Image (cartoon, helix red, strand yellow):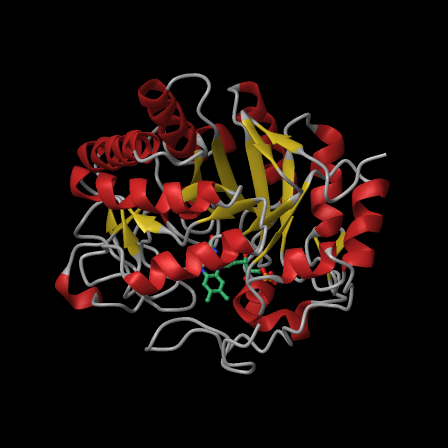
Amino acid sequence: MKTLYEKAKLGNIIASNRFIRSATWENMASEEGHMTNELYELYEELAKGEVGIIITGYANIVKEEKPNAGMMGMYNDSFIDEYRKLTNIVHAHGSKIIMQLAYGGTKTTYNVEDRIIFAPSEVPDLTTNVKGKPMSREDIEYIIEAFAEAGRRAKESGFDGVEVHGAHTYLINQFLSPYYNKRTDEYGGCLENRMRFLLEIYQRIREKVGTSFPILVKLTATEFFDGGLTFQETIQICKELERIGCDGIELSGNIHGKAKSMVGKIFDGHELVSEGYFIEYAKIISNETNIPIITVGGFRDITIIERILTETNIDFFALSRPLLTEPHLIKRWKTGDRTPAKCIRCSKCRTPEGNYCVTFNKVN
Ligand SMILES: Cc1cc2nc3c(=O)[nH]c(=O)nc-3n(C[C@H](O)[C@H](O)[C@H](O)COP(=O)(O)O)c2cc1C
């Protein structure tokens, strides 16, 4: 029988348990995306708290495109030494660390006047109303290569793997989405074409990092609106990722800010659940593929997580907000205090002074 605190394999990574800190932008890097003492300390705390695998906040892959303040950068080789220090710190405490790589896109209001923002087509983002520049072939090639170079840097920095951010309406998600992607070339139209950008990014990274370096992809289960990417399509994308050797899929949906109004509703035939929002979707994908599945979103209760582990083929459980409140939560549960996470899911953790738990004010 699988247990949460046993060694678990994700690609080539042997994690000390099945818990993952899901990517969480900290708003603590320098203006240029460089590491700060605050960030080193935060990652060390997570590692001391025995998180099996830590996924970094999203790191930008080209300097000119930064969807948020204070995010980490991975857009040139100047980052390698400081991330080597980071990965050494985390490894010294027995945790593994994966870097999340992202191109933001139009789902941002950060400095949007000052820069060109790429998009598949000229469709304004539903939440920000920002319109991007439809990408030319050259633009697409430029971004694919930038992802791949960032992957190479991650490997050289000692990260245990990378995660490509293909969820949350960022650029790759927009290519996958029939709502945002209105292209008529080989990157738009049928699903095979819409997933081409993601698959080419994956493959180019693979060419640079070799066969044994883990590459994960974070995907949205469904887009939760008419005309968006459907769950049936996401299943097909996962199967294709499995076919080309992807090491793991984190299934998300980005509803954490509005979960209260969405939990209990049915989308694409499945219900959003209060404890583990996307669990119904993750279950199906874990049955239909042999790729390790990470479920993220809305976990607070270890008893329920344990039940899901034993009743499904889901392999890993990722948490974001609960670890902002309690960086040592995983160790706390392991050492016998199994009360649910203190996080009350208020989602007020984004602040101009850095992202942290305002409710419990960093108290562990
Ligand atoms: C402050 C904050 C920053 C986040 N940053 C990222 C990010 O950089 N990349 C990402 O894929 N998801 C990001 N997320 C989403 C989380 O990874 C996670 O999918 C979501 O919060 C649901 O998990 P939870 O209920 O455990 O918080 C962020 C969430 C929060 C609250």
Question: Residue 303, relative to residue 188: is it above or below?
Answer: below
The structure residue drawn at horizontal position 28% and vertical position 32%, both measured from the top left corner, is 144
Q: Is residue 336 left or right of residue 207?
A: right
Q: Is residue 69 left or right of residue 64?
A: right
The structure residue drawn at horizontal position 43% and vertical position 55%, both measured from the top left corner, is 43
Q: Is residue 137 left or right of residue 103?
A: left
**Residue 23: horizontal and vertical position, in percent?**
47, 53
Answer with the quarter of the image where residue 26 lies.
bottom left
Q: Which one is nearer the viewer's eye here, 179 or 356?
A: 356
Q: Is residue 128 left or right of residue 358?
A: left
Question: Residue 152, relative to residue 165: is it above or below?
Answer: above
Question: Residue 110, relative to residue 97: is it above or below?
Answer: below
Q: Which one is nearer the viewer's eye here, 48 or 180?
A: 48
Residue 364 in view in this figure: yes
**Residue 281: horizontal and vertical position, in percent?**
71, 46
**Residue 248: horizontal and vertical position, in percent?**
57, 33
Image quadrant occupied by the C terminus? bottom right
The structure residue drawn at horizontal position 59% and vertical position 38%, both measured from the top left corner, is 233
